[in-house]
């Protein structure tokens, strides 16, 4: 059985040393002690959400705290090839489903996108509230999947902002049903040209329920994005991104 994972402030986690004691408090300590009812002798992991992980044995359980004897402490390696999901805002929680699954599949960052055909909109105060909701979502999904890294959640972008951001990323692939090349074909071309020889960032762009319009696709292509299809069928906004990430994890040697 895998060890449960909890998050704690980075300064506290990174100051812990093997053989020493570490006290997990706050909301995470209460969750471990009163919700999970973990007991003395059980082993857990604690992370700073940026890849630094402690493994320890519970020495004592208090009122909302868990004290560990630290067995090991160190930085988990970051992947050579970084993956980003650009997810168009979608109705009925389909965008949140995609982000949650993407986190479990190892995505390194997510970008909420106001696509031209997005029905859901984050305006004014809703923009930061929406980002914080996604951040809570990826944090919970990281705990569930025992990830020591919590994906970054960037501020929401409109198409103009996404176009500007695209120019700064190594590889951006827009998933589109009318694309000539498949995603695997696209990766094969990058590999043969040496585009995957060193550290890279690859972003996958997923449109809303109504799809990505030709003019919008043209703007992204003008900034350097490529379009690719996943397969013979049209996937929902909630499943296209995770499906692409599974394939990229395999093709990039992350799995």
Image (spheres, helix red, strand yellow):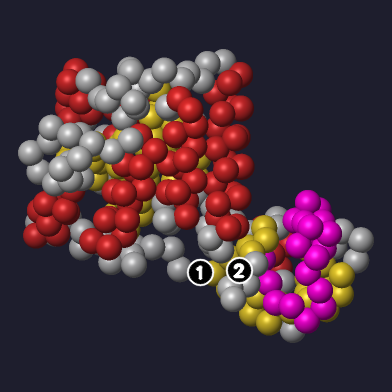
243 relative position to 234: left or right: right
Look at mark 1 in the image and give the residue it sits on. 76
Quarter of the image that includes the N terminus: bottom right
Res. 93 visible in picture: yes
> Dividing the picture into quarters, in which one does residue 50 lie?
bottom right
Q: Position of residue 93 (x, y in %)?
A: 49, 32
Asked if disc 1 and disc 2 are in contact, CB closer than 8 Å, the reply is: yes
185 relative position to 243: left or right: left
Q: Position of residue 106 (x, y in %)?
A: 43, 56
196 relative position to 31: left or right: left
Q: Residue at image x 27%, y 25%?
A: 211
CA–CA distance in space, label 1 to label 2: 7 Å
Res. 11 visible in picture: no
Residue farthest along the right direction in this orientation? 63
Q: Position of residue 116 (x, y in %)?
A: 33, 17
Label 2 sits on a secondary structure element that is strand
**Which residue occupies the foreground of this view, 239 or 148?**
239
N-term mark: 1 or 2 = 2
Quarter of the image that includes the C terminus: bottom left
What stretch of residues is rendered in magenta? Answer: 26-46
Q: Residue at image x 47%, y 18%?
A: 121
Q: Where is 219 relative to 15, above or below?
A: above
Look at mark 2 in the image and give the residue it sits on. 53
Q: Where is 17 relative to 252, above or below?
A: below
In the rendered image, residue 27 lying in the magenta stretch gets the answer yes
Q: Position of residue 61 (x, y in %)?
A: 87, 70
Q: Residue at image x 92%, y 61%?
A: 63
């Amino acid at each position: 059985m895998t060890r449960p994972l909890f998050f704690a402030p980075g300064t506290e986690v990174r100051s812990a040393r093997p053989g020493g004691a570490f006290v997990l408090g706050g909301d995470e300590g209460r969750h471990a002690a009163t919700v999970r009812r973990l007991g003395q002798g059980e082993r857990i992991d604690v992370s700073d959400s940026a890849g630094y992980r402690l493994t320890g044995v519970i020495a004592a359980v208090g009122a909302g705290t868990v004290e560990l004897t630290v067995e090991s402490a160190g930085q988990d390696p970051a992947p050579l090839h970084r993956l980003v999901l650009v997810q168009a805002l979608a109705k009925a929680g389909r965008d949140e489903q995609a982000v949650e699954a993407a986190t479990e599949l190892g995505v390194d960052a997510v970008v909420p996108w106001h696509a031209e055909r997005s029905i859901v909109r984050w305006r004014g105060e809703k923009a930061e509230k929406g980002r914080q909701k996604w951040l809570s979502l990826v944090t919970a999904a990281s705990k569930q999947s025992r990830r020591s890294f919590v994906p970054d959640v960037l501020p929401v972008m409109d198409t103009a902002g996404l176009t500007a951001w695209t120019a700064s990323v190594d590889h951006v692939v827009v998933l589109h049903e009318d694309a000539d090349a498949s995603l695997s074909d696209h990766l094969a071309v990058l590999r043969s040209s040496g585009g995957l020889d060193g550290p890279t960032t690859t972003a996958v762009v997923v449109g809303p329920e109504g799809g990505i319009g030709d003019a919008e696709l043209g703007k992204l292509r003008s900034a350097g994005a490529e379009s690719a299809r996943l397969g013979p069928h049209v996937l929902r906004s909630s499943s296209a991104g995770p499906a692409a990430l599974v394939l990229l994890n395999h093709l990039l040697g992350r799995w």
